[in-house]
Image (cartoon, grey):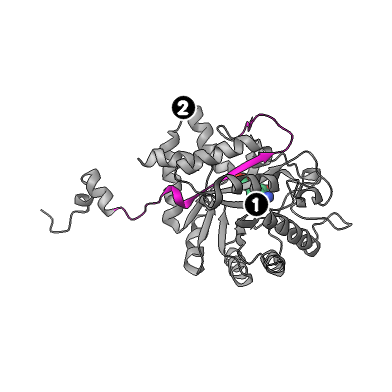
């Protein structure tokens, strides 16, 4: 017999495996991204994301109630509207669906529910870019920052807990922090989409928010090139220096190396976003009977935590409690 140790002893029974498992997570570490749409009276299922719908105000409140019962205390909202304009100005008003949803959720659930809002312009502009355009049709970084400041203030006024700038404009975190502090919103936090890659995995999301980029364009001039890693670390360092309370890597499961590197350098919580395409790959294969939905989703989420994420945004959030039990 060999005198080497027997690693299999630590895998012998489920109880032993649980005893020595290195990675675990709870629903409290998850955030549900949710879509609230203007001008509908019933929730509208999103075809490319089976199991996910655009919400009315009422169905959003029900969703949040179910979420809390599933041990998930955080929601991240996206507004959806037909009423788009060239600079997304309609989204900065208190009467807009996003601000109304935030106020209604806060009124119903108080501090039990942490409310985050995506802060970007693509959902609200006719051209579908994340910023305002200059007269050559390119995204104008610094003019966009002024819009982001306005949007941040209107979300804060609606009583959002965290704004989550996702447009990848340079200095967006500093600009938003300055605007919020300037108006006394010092407790409104910033979850920065810091290392956000130009990814084909956002495909189903664009159905969810009904966004098409004009002229078949893309976001490669402001989102990151997936061939690069160092650039992500630089984006994260800048966002931390500019005052981000949490940073994010997005997408998640194809970017585990970036999550691991982020968790090494960040002194603040690292979030990872399991995006629409990651959800749909699992959900659609499972719906066709080719994959086990809960098993693959749990494996994917666990891998994201194992890589070093402290919290994860996932469309599976509500189901996780049942799977872990
Ligand atoms: C931009 C934004 C996007 C997502 C979140 N915020 C789309 C994009 O950058 O094109 C994608 C989320 C997902 O795919 O689930 N407002």
Residue 118 circle label: 1
Is label 1 in a helix, a strand or a loop?
strand
Q: Is residue 236 visible?
A: yes
**Residue sitting farthest toward the right:** 135
Is label 2 in a helix, a strand or a loop?
loop
**Residue sitting farthest toward the bottom:** 241
**Residue 134 locus on image (x, y percent):** 86, 58
Q: Earlier in the sequence, mark 2 or mark 1?
A: 1
Confirm if mark 1 falls within 8 A of ligand 1.
yes
Q: Is residue 135 above or below residue 207?
A: below
**Residue 321 locus on image (x, y percent):** 41, 41
Q: Is residue 167 visible?
A: no
Which span is picked out in magenta? 21-48
Query: In terms of depth relative to the viewer, which is nearer, 233 or 152?
Result: 152
**Residue sitting farthest toward the left:** 1
**Residue 179 locus on image (x, y percent):** 72, 66
Q: Quadrant of the C terminus?
A: top left
Image quadrant in which you'd find residue 166: bottom right
Q: Is residue 57 above or below residue 177?
A: above
For this view, does 130 lie left or right of residue 243? right
Residue 53 circle label: none
Query: Dot 2, how many residues are within 10 Å of its Cα: few (below 14), some (14-19), or many (20+)?
Result: few
Task: Please tell me whether mark 2 or mark 1 is closer to you in this view.
Answer: 1
At 80% from the left and 46% from the top, the residue drawn is 127
Q: Which residue is mark 2?
A: 289
**Residue 305 locus on image (x, y percent):** 44, 54
């Amino acid at each position: 017999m060999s005198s080497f140790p027997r690693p299999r002893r630590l895998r012998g029974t489920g109880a032993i495996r649980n005893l020595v498992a290195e990675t675990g997570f709870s629903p409290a570490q998850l955030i549900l991204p949710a879509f609230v749409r203007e001008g509908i009276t019933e929730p509208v299922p999103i075809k490319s994301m089976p199991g996910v719908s655009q919400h009315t105000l009422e169905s959003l409140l029900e969703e949040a109630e179910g979420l809390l019962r599933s041990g998930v205390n955080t929601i991240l909202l996206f507004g959806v509207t037909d009423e788009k304009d060239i600079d997304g100005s309609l989204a900065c008003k208190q009467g807009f669906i996003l601000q109304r949803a935030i106020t209604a959720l806060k009124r119903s659930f108080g501090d039990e529910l942490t409310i985050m809002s995506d802060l970007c312009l693509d959902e609200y502009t006719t051209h579908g870019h994340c910023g305002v355009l200059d007269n050559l049709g390119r995204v104008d970084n610094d003019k966009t920052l002024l819009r982001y400041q306005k949007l941040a203030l209107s979300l804060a006024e609606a009583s959002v807990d965290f704004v989550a700038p996702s447009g990848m404009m340079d200095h967006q975190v500093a600009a938003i922090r300055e605007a919020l502090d300037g108006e006394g919103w010092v407790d409104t936090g910033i979850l920065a989409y810091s290392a956000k890659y130009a990814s084909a995995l956002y495909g189903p999301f664009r159905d969810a928010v009904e966004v098409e980029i004009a002229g078949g364009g893309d976001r490669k001039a402001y989102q990151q090139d997936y061939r690069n890693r160092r650039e992500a670390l630089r984006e994260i360092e800048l966002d931390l220096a500019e005052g981000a309370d949490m940073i994010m890597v997005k997408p998640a499961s194809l970017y585990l190396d970036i999550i691991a590197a982020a968790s090494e350098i960040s002194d603040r919580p690292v979030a990872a976003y399991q995006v629409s395409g990651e959800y749909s790959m699992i959900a659609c294969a499972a719906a066709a009977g080719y994959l086990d939905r809960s098993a693959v989703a749990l494996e994917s989420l666990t891998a994201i935590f194992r890589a070093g994420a402290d919290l994860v945004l996932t469309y599976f959030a509500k189901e996780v409690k049942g799977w872990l039990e």
